[in-house]
Amino acid sequence: MLHSLRQLLRHRALVQSLVARELKARYRGSTLGLLWSFINPLLLLSIYTFVFTTVMPGARSAGIEPFSLFLFCGLLPWTWFSSSLLESSNSLIAGGNLIRKVLFPAEVLPIVSVFAGLVHFCLGLPILAAFFIYYRVPVPLTDLAWFPLIVLEQLLLTLGFALMVSALTVHFRDLRDLLANVLTLAFFLTPIIYPLSQAPAWARPFLNLNPFTTLAVSYQEVLAIPGPFLGWPRLLIFAVVSVAVFVAGYFVFDRLRDTLAEEV
Amino acid sequence: MNAIEVRDVRKTYRRYGRRTTFGTLKSAILTGRVARDLKADEAFEALKGVSFDVPSGKTLGIVGRNGSGKSTMLKLIAGIGRPTAGDVKVQGRVSALIELGAGFHPEISGRDNVFINGMMLGLSKREVASRFDEIVAFAELEEFIDEPVKTYSSGMYMRLGFSVAINVDPDVLLVDEVLAVGDEAFTHKCLDKFADFRRRGRTVLLVTHSLDMVTRFCDEALWLDHGLVRAQGDPRRVVDAYLLDVAAAENRALARNPAVSVASTTEQPEDMMKAVEGRWGSREAEIAAVEFVRSDGVAAHVFESGEALAIRMRVRAHHPLTDFVFGVALFSAEGVCCYGTNTDIEGAEPLEFTGDAEVGFVIDSLCLVAGTYTVDVAVHRRNGVPYDYHRSLYTIRVTSRVNETGIVRPPHRWTFSSGIRISGL
């Protein structure tokens, strides 16, 4: 496995080029091009904001103002997480020709999906910044210092899941459909459209079991919720979890590696 | 030093007979057999213990019939997939021309695809950049390199793929039946590139059905048959052994005597020329069996052009006959009658035919070019009414070392006056 990881490092330029290709190819032929990277999250955000502030304003708890800002802090990383997983689950099958005919580390494919998601995430950050400026919400620099760590942990967590899902999907094709539903469920079981504090006390331990909860809460606390970031011990512990998920994902992928060329 | 060492390599492909199409997780869980489904229930041995070495700087050609394990062997050497047992060792950088342009993305430009493809094949970005002009020039795509690959013709696509793969400049080049890209000129360029490779002491492994290429380009040949090495060594010798085996297999395939199985009628078809295949006649006299015999007396169905061929018919008259003609005709695969004759045309006067007898039609030198021919044999009255007519029931194959065109090969020789020096004829 260490050998495979070293191999992978040698291919980082390839990953970089493939991510660039992914982004280029996606918007080739569309009129708005890269603008879609901005429009997509904005549209999603306006839909949720409309539902929770205009259609049923009673459904959201008081104290989190402005709501759209809070929502955005959770929605943006979630979009990265879920779209990366959905895409990587399909990546090996779509790239089947490569795996069967060219000697090249197959894990590059799901990894590219995750990094392409990261680029979209980063393109969403200026919009988030614009929101903060618009609402005149100050973000203390001491809190902001935690931000890269959260992103890094999410990256490892997503990579781990993506590797696992992509390799398993080759063997069980319906994992793709299952995954779409699991992700929808997970979205509502993660404090994104509601704060964790609003969930009933009995439900909170279950929500905390959800690996994405820690990330979402950290994003919100660091960015949207005023006051110092109190969740940092939890975030540090979660670093162990994200590394473990990554290692587990890579391990599963490595074990299934030899079967991929024949099964895909 | 050996560039490639293959030691007792086995490769078993698993087959999942129980699963109909793709395994689904749902069905696996529902029937509680996740573990069982992940286990194969049938194995197919593509390679059954293959060992060989390729010395550095040599060109090895692998021949063998379809399904003999050639491509599997190549993939294992390329590192795509691992042997089930045994060892494959390769010294230096490998580039495999297995599928050209695999991994090209249709939406992005040829330029970007060259970079990504080159990096997939193991070059660094800088290396691709330094070879970029050469790659594009070799593929003859200077004008189109910034167009998206989806606008390329399949020839352009393959040329670009070939060009990238060959310019990776590997120590070991694996080629799988990919020279059929582009026009004549491009094929020549590819062959020149291979020759250049050999001059610079690189190792080439060539899998091909073009035996001509093996004898012309390879230092050594390897013949794989059903996952085992049948022969290795001098290309001429291996190719000849392989051709003999192919001929023997064809002999076996053509040997089944079809006259027995074809439904026969006493009715003659209305238009003889339109009849495709069959047997008809009154059966007062019968052709019981037909054999094709080589000069050494052995029955065969594959003959070398120029060799002797005897058609031996066992015939039987059910009552004594005084009106009978024996005939033979050869047709090419396109249905063109190459030669037809009978005893009546040649002026013979039938006197008596009783009981069991044998008729031989001996061609001392088979003057036909390589190809598949069908044979008609018949016994009939002088006025044409058939006793027993066998239409296209027998097939023979004629092989030749030279690929002339046409149907007939008249015995010939070339002469040259002084002033022309030529060798090999």
Image (cartoon, coloured by chain):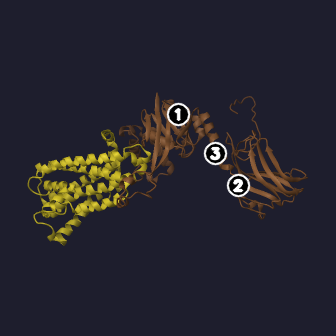
Q: Earlier in the sequence, mark 1 or mark 3?
A: 1
Q: Are marks 1 and 2 on the same chain?
A: yes
Select label 1 or label 3 by which is in front: 3
Local crowd size for mark 2, using a 10 Å CA cut-off: few (<14), some (14–19), many (≥20): some
Sequence-wise, which precedes: disc 2 or disc 3?
3
Residue located beneath label 2 in the image? B258
Task: Chain letter for mark 2, please.
Answer: B
Q: Are marks 1 and 2 in contact (CB under 8 Å)?
A: no
Q: Which residue is mark 1?
A: B59
Amino acid residing under circle 3? Ala
At 79% from the left and 58% from the top, the residue drawn is: B388
- Up the image or down, B399 lies above or below A117; here it is above
First in residue order: circle 1 vs circle 2: 1
Residue B304 is situated, as x and y percent measured from the top left of the image, at 71, 41
Q: Residue at x 43, y 34 (%)?
A: B89
SS under mark 1:
strand
**Residue under numbered circle 3:** B249
